[in-house]
Image: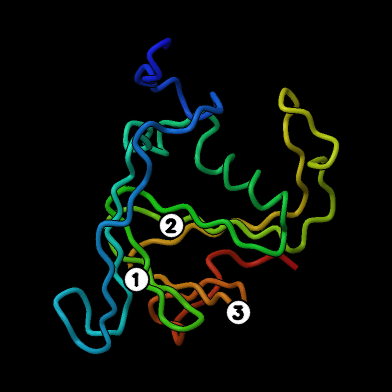
């Protein structure tokens, strides 16, 4: 505008490349060292205002949660991709986390990928990944981040859901 003011930006979607007009802001942070209102375990609590991103719930973005997680870990297979449903949380304790809530947590592990086209893939091409591991965890399940494996609510009684035929 000629007078030096800027016209308000319109939300055109996350893929537009435009910076959000209202940025994400950390509203509150707290470190709890012992039993407290939220948990009996020590934890860090963050309250975040997502700004303009609030208008773009991740469950409504194109590509779906699993597709976005696969794309993220394809770029760096050493990391784990973690997707968390609505009304669901993880409680991180040391090198493991536990799932809380009514939804699921999805863990994508590409550490053992044997083939990927991510280096040569164009935006209009489909992603190709071979030998990716997907863990779907519900309330009571856990995950060991060091061993990269799920933990059942009762590891002592845990057994394979399916056994291979000999």
Q: Earlier in the sequence, mark 2 or mark 3?
A: 2
10 Å crowding of disc 1: few (<14), some (14-19), many (20+) = few
Q: CA distance from mark 2 to mark 3?
A: 17 Å
Residue depicted at 34% across the width and 36% down the height: 22
Q: Residue furthest front?
A: 3
Residue depicted at 77% across the width and 39% down the height: 128
- In what quadrant of the picture does the N terminus appear? top left
- In what quadrant of the picture does the C terminus appear? bottom right
The image shows residue 24, relative to residue 150, as above or below, that is above
Residue 101: percent from left, percent from top: 27, 60
10 Å crowding of disc 2: few (<14), some (14-19), many (20+) = many
Q: Would you name the residue on which mark 3 appears?
A: 146
Residue depicted at 55% across the width and 31% down the height: 63
Mark 2 secondary-structure assignment: strand
In the picture, measured across the screen, residue 129 lies left or right of residue 41, that is right
Q: Would you name the residue on which mark 1 appears?
A: 140
Numbered tag placed on residue 78 in the rendering? none
Q: Earlier in the sequence, mark 2 or mark 1?
A: 2
Residue 127: percent from left, percent from top: 73, 36
Numbered tag placed on residue 105 in the rendering? 2
Residue depicted at 51% across the width and 57% down the height: 82
The image shows residue 5, relative to residue 159, as above or below, that is above
**Decide: marks 2, 3 in contact (CB < 8 A)?**
no
Q: Residue furthest top?
A: 2
Residue 147: percent from left, percent from top: 62, 78
Question: Between residues 74 and 136, which one lies in front from this camera angle?
Answer: 74
Mark 3 secondary-structure assignment: loop
Question: Between residues 129 and 80, which one lies in front from this camera angle?
Answer: 80
Q: CA distance from mark 2 to mark 1?
A: 11 Å
Question: Between residues 130 and 121, which one lies in front from this camera angle?
Answer: 121
């Amino acid at each position: 505008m000629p007078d030096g003011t800027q016209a308000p930006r319109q939300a055109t979607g996350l893929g537009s490349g435009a910076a959000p007009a209202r940025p994400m802001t950390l509203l509150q942070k707290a470190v709890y060292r012992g039993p407290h209102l939220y948990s009996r375990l020590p934890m860090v609590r963050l309250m975040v205002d997502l700004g303009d991103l609030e208008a773009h719930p991740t469950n409504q973005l194109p590509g779906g949660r699993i597709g976005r997680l696969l794309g993220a870990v394809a770029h760096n297979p050493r990391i784990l991709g973690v997707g968390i449903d609505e009304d669901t949380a993880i409680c991180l304790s040391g090198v493991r986390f536990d799932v809380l809530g009514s939804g699921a947590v999805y863990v994508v592990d590409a550490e053992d990928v044997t083939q990927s086209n991510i280096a040569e893939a164009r935006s209009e091409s489909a992603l190709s990944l071979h030998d990716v591991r997907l863990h779907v965890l519900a309330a009571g399940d856990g995950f060991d981040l060091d061993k990269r494996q799920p933990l059942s609510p009762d590891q002592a009684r845990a057994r394979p859901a399916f056994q291979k035929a000999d």
